[in-house]
Image (cartoon, grey):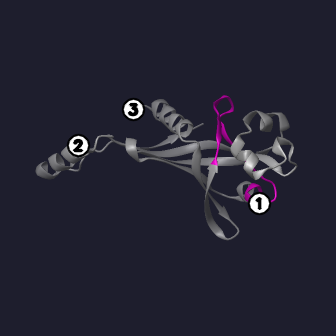
Amino acid sequence: MSDAELQERIWTALAAHPVYMVSLIGEDGLKTRPMAGEIDRDRHRILFVTHRHTGIIGEALRSPSISIAISHEDRNFYAAVACTASEIHDRQLLGRIWTPMASAWFPQGPDDPDATLLALTPVSAEIWDGPSSSVLVAFKLATARILGRTPDLGVNATIDMR
């Protein structure tokens, strides 16, 4: 599978399940939290509505490493996507991607002065993409064991996401 095909698999996976585990290095060490994101493929980024005062904006901008973890166990697909972070000051964009879930956190809606956008731009990704059939996995494991070989359980690759 080419890097372009693997990159497309990652964007498809990101779009399919828009809540990700976002990890960064903060003042107190590694922090991981679930965050709902909005894919902006035209600008090659994932947007998150967040609070200015929670610290994630500052932590993300200072963090030497930010990643998004994707896990689709039913498809035997996993990826860790390394990203860069930026804050976007665009009220029109904030209003366009606003969701009812965001309203739960920001009662004043998209005009809430504490609401801001965190943009994560994928730089690289490590991907694990294997057969989704448990029967096929069991067959490959058994065959490899009988033949004394390492089982071929799919693709593990690091790709450029830029």
User: Could you tell me how many numbered marks the image carries?
Assistant: 3
Q: Is residue 30 magenta?
A: no
Q: Quadrant of the N terminus?
A: top left
Is 20 on the left-hand or right-hand side of 128? right
Q: CA distance from mark 3 to mark 2?
A: 22 Å
Check disc 1 and give the amino acid type: Thr
Instruction: Between residue 100 and residue 10, name the one nearer to us.
Output: 100
Badge nearest the viewer, 3 or 1? 1
Give how far across and how far down residue 87 sits, in percent: 78, 47
Check disc 3 and give the amino acid type: Met
- Residue at 21% x, 44% y is 140
Name the N-terminal-most of marks 3 and 1. 3
10 Å crowding of disc 2: few (<14), some (14-19), many (20+): few
- Residue interval drawn in magenta: 36-58
Instruction: Between residue 67 and residue 34, name the one nearer to us.
Output: 34
Residue 111 in view in this figure: yes
Tell me if residue 5 comes above or below residue 81 in the rendering: above
10 Å crowding of disc 3: few (<14), some (14-19), many (20+): few
Helix, strand, or loop for circle 1?
loop
Residue 76 in view in this figure: no
Task: Report which residue position mark 1 lands on.
Answer: 54
Task: Report which residue position mark 3 lands on.
Answer: 1
Name the N-terminal-most of marks 3 and 2. 3
Helix, strand, or loop for circle 3?
loop
Badge nearest the viewer, 3 or 2? 2
Give how far across and how far down residue 62 sits, in percent: 73, 58
Q: CA distance from mark 1 to mark 2?
A: 46 Å
- Residue at 23% x, 43% y is 135
Q: Quadrant of residue 127?
A: top left
